[in-house]
Amino acid sequence: MSSRETAYDAIILGAGQAGPSLASRLARAGMKTALVERKLLGGTCVNTGCTPTKALVASAYAAHLARRAADLGVLVPGEVRVDFPRAMARARGISQVSRDGLDRWLRGTEGLTLLQGHARFEGPQAIRVGEDLLTAPRIFLNVGGRAVVPDMPGVAEVPFLTNSSMLALDRLPRHLVVVGGSYVGLEFAQIHRRFGAQVTVVEKGPRLIGREDEDVSEAVRGILEGEGISVRTHAECIGFTRQAEGVAVSLDCPEGPPVVVGSDLLLAVGRRPNTDDLGLDRAGIRTDARGYVVVDESLATSVPGIWALGDCNGRGAFTHTSYNDYEIVAANLLDGARRKVSERLPAYALYIDPPLGRAGMTETEARATGRPILVGKRPMTRVNRAVEKGETAGFMKVVADAESRRILGAAILGTGGDEAIHGLLDTMHAGVGWDVLRWAVPIHPTVSELIPTVLGEMQPAG
C-alpha cells in the first residue's frame, strides 16, 4: 500500500465529547494536530445519546402534560395525538445542528486537520487512516463505546434495536419490549409509552436500576407502572424467537406469563468500548478483560505518549466525565497541573420523568463503609414546588458522615431533581460540612429550598 506520511505533534482518535475540545486546545497551544473520526462528529452524546434522547424526552413530556392538562384546569379539545415521525425528525434535526456547529468550529481552527476514516495503529506513534500514515509523539484515544448485544438464546435469529437504531425509527412501535431495566432502557420505555406504545420492560435482576438504593428502584418502578408500563423482574432465562407479529421474548419470572410478544425489541443491557478494531496490540496498549483501555490517574495508558479519554477508558460513562477527562489531560499537559481522575465525584442523572439526580455514594454504599452515617429524607409530596406543579412523585435523600458531617451522597428523584442535586454536589466538591449548606437561604418556591430542611432533619441510620 502506498502511503502519504504526515508528521503531527498530536493525533486524537474520535470526535466525541473530549476529542474536539482537546484538539482545539492543543492546536491553539501551537501543536500541529490531527483529529480522526470514523463516523459522525459529536460521538454518542450528539448522535445517539444525550442530545436526541433528551429531545424525545421533551416531546414525550409535552404529550404527558397535555393528557393531564385538565388536572391543572386547562381543557385540551379532542384526543392528544403524537406525530411520531415529526418528533423523531425534531430530535435528529437538533443533532444535525450540533454536528454542523462542530464541523465549522473544527475546520476553522488553525493548526487542526480533521480527517474522516477508520484509524488503526501501526506502532506506538503511527496511525493509518486509509492510505494516509500519521505519526505523532502524542496520541489520544477518544473512541467511545457502543451497545452490547447479549449472548442470549435466539438473539441472532430475531430483529432487534439498540439505542442507536432506535433513533432511526420512522414509526411508533405497537408493543416495545425493552430488555434491560437500567438508565437507557427506562428512558426509551417511558418515552415510547407516552408516545402511545404498549411497553414491557424485562430485567434479569431482582429490581430496576440495581446500582441504586432499593427505595429509589421501587419508586422508579412505581412511576413507570403508574403510566401503564409492564415491568418484569427476576427474568433469569431470557430467549427470543421470531413471530409473525414481531418477537417473542421467553421469560423465567416468578410471576406473570412466560412469554411476551412484542412488535419491536430493544436490547439495553450495557455498553462496550470501541477498542476491538484499532490495532491496539501493535502499539502495546493494554486493555482489561472487557476491552477498556487501562489508564492511570492522569489517564495515561501503558504506553508513554498515549492517553485514553471518555467511555473507552472505563473511568466514566457520561458526557460530563468525558469532558472532565479532557480538562484533566489538558491541565496536566499544558498548564503544569497534577490533576487526577480519582478527584472526580461520581454524579449522574436518570432522565425518566421525574428525573433522578445522583451524587456521590448511595445509602447502601455508605453503610458498607462501616462508618456512622446520618440520613435525611423527604417525599416530594412535602415539597411546595412539586405540589404546585402537580408532580409529586419521588423523594429527596441525603447521606452524611456522622462524625465529619461531610455529605457522602444524595439522591433527588422528583421534578427538577437533575438540577437541584447540584447544590449538594457543589457542597461535596468544596469539601465542607453540611452545616454550611444547612444555613443557606435558598429561593422559594424551588425544589432546592428543601435541601437545608432535609439536612436539618438528619437522623442516625437505623
Image (spheres, rainbow, N blue to C red):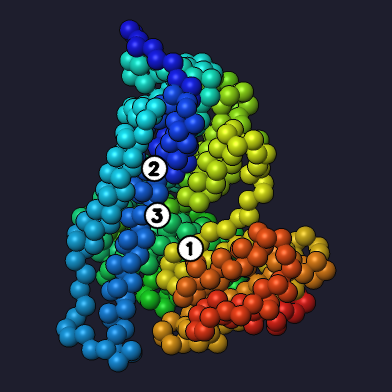
Say which residue label 1 marks. 350
**SS for callout 3:** helix
Kindly indicate whether the residue at mark 1 contacts the one at mark 2 (C-beta within 8 angstroms): no
Q: Which of marks 2 and 1 is nearer the N terminus?
A: 2
Q: Is mark 2 on a helix, strand or loop?
A: helix
Where is residue 368? Give x, y as percent. Answer: 75, 61
Q: Which one is in front in this view, the residue at disc 1 or the one at disc 3?
A: 3
- Cα–Cα span, label 3 and label 2: 10 Å
Q: Quadrant of the N terminus?
A: top left
Q: Can residue 158 be seen in this view?
A: no
Q: In this view, does 449 lie above or below 288?
A: below
Which mark, residue 50? Answer: 3
Q: Which residue is drawn at 32% across and 29% down?
A: 116
| Residue ID at (61%, 77%) | 451
Which comes sooner in the sequence, label 1 or label 3? Answer: 3
Q: Which of 200 and 320 is in front in this view?
A: 320
